[in-house]
Amino acid sequence: MSSALPADALKGTRIGVSVGTSADLHALGLDEARFRTALGELVRLLLSAGASLAYGGNLRQDGYTGLLLDQVREVAPTARPLLHCLAWYEHRAAPLSELTARRVEFARHGEMVCLSVDGEPVDPAEGRGEEPVPEPDPATKARALTGMRRHLARRVDGQLLLGGKRDGFLGSLPGLLEEALLALEAGRPCYLAAGFGGVTADLARTLGVEAAPDVPRATDSASPDPDPRLVDGLRRLRALMDEPGRAGLPNGLTTEENRALAGTRSPLEIASLTAVGVERLRGRV
């Protein structure tokens, strides 16, 4: 098998990257360092194949945003292929001068969009001064996260999911679960790379993709019971996919290909299957 995709395999395609820490890594014989290594390789493959990427995150350098930026600097330093969306409370939590400097720096690699509570682009300086704005209540945070994820769903051609928290999250649903629901509601295809466990594996199992890893349902907290918001979100997902006219995951992949995607941890296989699905939907395969 080739070590890379063709250079134009994903040209003109924006892939939303939905990624979060998986509580299943240890049970799968993995750890966060190996997960991040695999994610970095996957991102490099997507960029090398001509894709642009979208991610909703924060400003921490040690988070997944920093990992994505490192790959962009290495693989596509002048292409500006990264769309980074900041939820309302995220950009307001930084001093305005720091936020402005970060946006100027980021503009060399892509677009950083600051969003309102409802997910519309805003001027981050409007209605505030230099100091960070006090942290909002949990309900406002959850609303801002939903708004950010809805904005992302409108701006991608497909959503690629890996890992993800089942509990201990800030929104009204686990982040990757909400991103999958919003993407599917917006008519965007989802690609479930479930081999690293987490919420992505729960999504795959809920949708009948049998190759998702079968591991003990680890949680991210001390509670052995699933978060009710996770249970409700998976129920909503199943109900959405059971609507009349829907038949399986509408992502351009066959049943066997979705099983292969759910079962693999190979960055090349994940990137290749994502490319096949996206290109089939665009009529280029």
Image: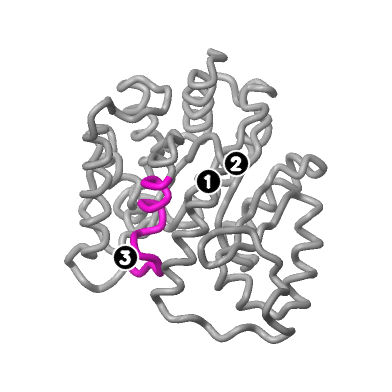
**Sequence-first tag of 3 and 2:** 2
Residue 17 image label: 1
Give the residue type that dot 3 points to.
Asp
User: Do tag 1 and tag 2 residues touch (Cβ < 8 Å)?
Assistant: yes
Alpha-carbon distance for marks 1 and 2?
9 Å
| Residue count near mark 3 (Cα–Cα under 10 Å), binned few <14, some 14–19, many ≥20 | many
Q: Residue 259, how many percent across, how many down?
A: 32, 28
Region of the chain picked out in magenta, as a range: 168-182
Identify residue type, mark 1. Val
Q: Residue at x 72, y 71 (%)?
A: 99
Q: Nearer the viewer, residue 24 or 152?
A: 152
**Label 1 or label 2, whichever comes before in sequence order:** 1
Query: N-terminal of the two: label 3 or label 1?
Result: 1
Residue at 48%, 40% in the rendered image:
159
Return the residue at label 3: 167
Residue in the image at 39% along x and 45% along y: 180
Residue 41 on the magenta segment = no
Between residue 39 and residue 53, name the one nearer to us: 53
Residue 42, percent across and down? 56, 39
**Helix, strand or loop for disc 2:** helix
Q: CA distance from mark 3 to mark 1?
A: 20 Å
Q: In the picture shown, does residue 136 fall above or below 156?
A: below
Give the image quarter of residue 230. Answer: bottom left
Judged by depth in the image, the label closer to the viewer, 1 or 2, is 1
**What is the residue that sits farthest to the left in this orientation?**
225
Name the side, left or right, on which 177 lies relative to 268. Answer: left
Q: Quadrant of residue 59?
A: bottom right
Within 10 Å of disc 1 (Cα), the crowding (few <14, some 14-19, many 20+) is many
Image coords of residue 197 (percent x, y): 33, 48
Q: Is residue 28 above or below residue 167?
A: above
Q: Of the numbered discs in the image, which one, if any, rests on residue 43?
A: 2
At a point 35% along the width and 69% down the height, the residue shown is 168
